[in-house]
Image (spheres, helix red, strand yellow):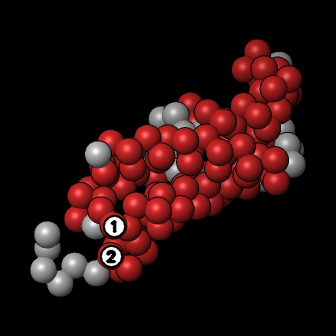
Amino acid sequence: MLTGFDPGAGLWGLGLYSLLAATLLPGGSELALYAFLKYAPTQAHPALLVATLGNTLGGLISWACGRFLPRWQRVERLPQVDRLRRWGAAALLFSWLPLIGDALCIAAGWLRLHWLPCALFMALGKFARYWLVVQAATN
């Protein structure tokens, strides 16, 4: 255990890192969560909540970026866009996937899918992934 380690300050860093990792910036928030829990195993529940919220907010930033992109006719005819339109916000359960998740969030905004169901599905998928990380780090 690190002497002088403040889990509260570490939670802020974890939240910020999780937020940035959900945008197009590279980063592995799972590793950050795992490392945090190795130093502060008693903070599993707050860390799970903070990582989920931070990563979901980052996904919503990507959604907003997509929302304000101009509409291109050629993109609308892509089969991936048709699939996302068919599945709707539920497709964002997979927003935790590397690279694909960022594209899903941006495309959902570009398709003008309502932000609230998008946020809920993003949060659910990201929570499930982080829950598995917490289980691995604390057992």
Q: Are marks 2 and 1 in contact (CB under 8 Å)?
A: yes
Q: Residue at x 48, y 35 (%)?
A: 98
Q: Which mark is residue 42?
A: 1
Q: Residue at x 43, y 74 (%)?
A: 12
Name, please, the residue furthest toward the top: 79
Q: Secondary structure at mark 2?
A: helix
Q: Of the residues shown, which amino acid type is indicated by label 2?
A: Pro
Q: Residue at x 55, y 56 (%)?
A: 52
Q: Of the residues shown, which amino acid type is indicated by label 1?
A: Thr
User: How far apart are the alpha carbons under marks 2 and 1?
Assistant: 9 Å
Q: In x, y percent, where is residue 118? A: 76, 46
Q: Is residue 102 visible?
A: no
The correct choice, above or below, for 2 with respect to 100 in the image is below
Q: In x, y percent, where is residue 68? A: 78, 53
Q: In x, y percent, where is residue 87? A: 81, 26
Q: Secondary structure at mark 1?
A: helix
Where is mark 2, residue-wise?
Answer: 7
